Image (tube, helix red, strand yellow):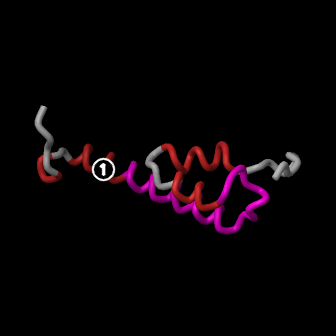
Amino acid sequence: MPKKSWSELSNPARAAIAAVSTVEILVTLAAWRDLKRRPGSALRGPKPFWALVSLVQPVGPLAYFAFARRSATQPDHT
């Protein structure tokens, strides 16, 4: 199947792409904001690593929220 240009897509397809893109951007920005505000000792790994991981769409920001942050009850093992 040949790739379609934006103008060849149906309105629902355009809306779906726009919605998914918006969600990806918002989740990435939320991850970066959290990363900026969180002390390094509250993360599993260095901040630059997680900043780069969060750029990998769509799994990077989700991985950050699932795996990078230490819970408040978890002891610091650095």
Q: Position of residue 7 (x, y in %)?
A: 13, 53
Outermost residue toward the bottom in this view: 37
Secondary structure beneath dot 1 equals helix
Location of the N terminus (image quadrant): top left
Left or right, residue 72 beside residue 67: right
| Three-letter residue code for mark 1 | Ala
Q: Is residue 35 magenta?
A: yes
Using the rendered view, name the quadrant where residue 10 is placed.
top left
Left or right, residue 40 beside residue 25: right
The image shows residue 5, relative to residue 40, as above or below, that is above
Task: Count residues near mark 1 (Cα–Cα under 10 Å), then give few for <14, some for 14-19, many for 20+.
Answer: few
**Which residue does the image show at 66% across and 57% down from the upper left?**
46
In front of the other: 66 or 8: 66
Residue holding disc 1: 15
Using the rendered view, name the quadrant where residue 49 is placed.
bottom right
Which portion, as a residue range, is magenta? 19-46
**Which residue does the image show at 14% across and 49% down from the upper left?**
5
Q: Position of residue 37 (x, y in %)?
A: 69, 68
**Which residue does the image show at 45% across and 45% down from the upper left?**
58
Q: Position of residue 31 (x, y in %)?
A: 59, 58
Q: Is residue 39 magenta?
A: yes
Task: Please tell me whether the stretch drawn in magenta is mainly helix, strand or loop.
Answer: helix
**Which residue does the image show at 58% across and 63% down from the upper left?**
32
Using the rendered view, name the quadrant where residue 40 is placed.
bottom right
The image shows residue 56, relative to residue 26, as above or below, that is above
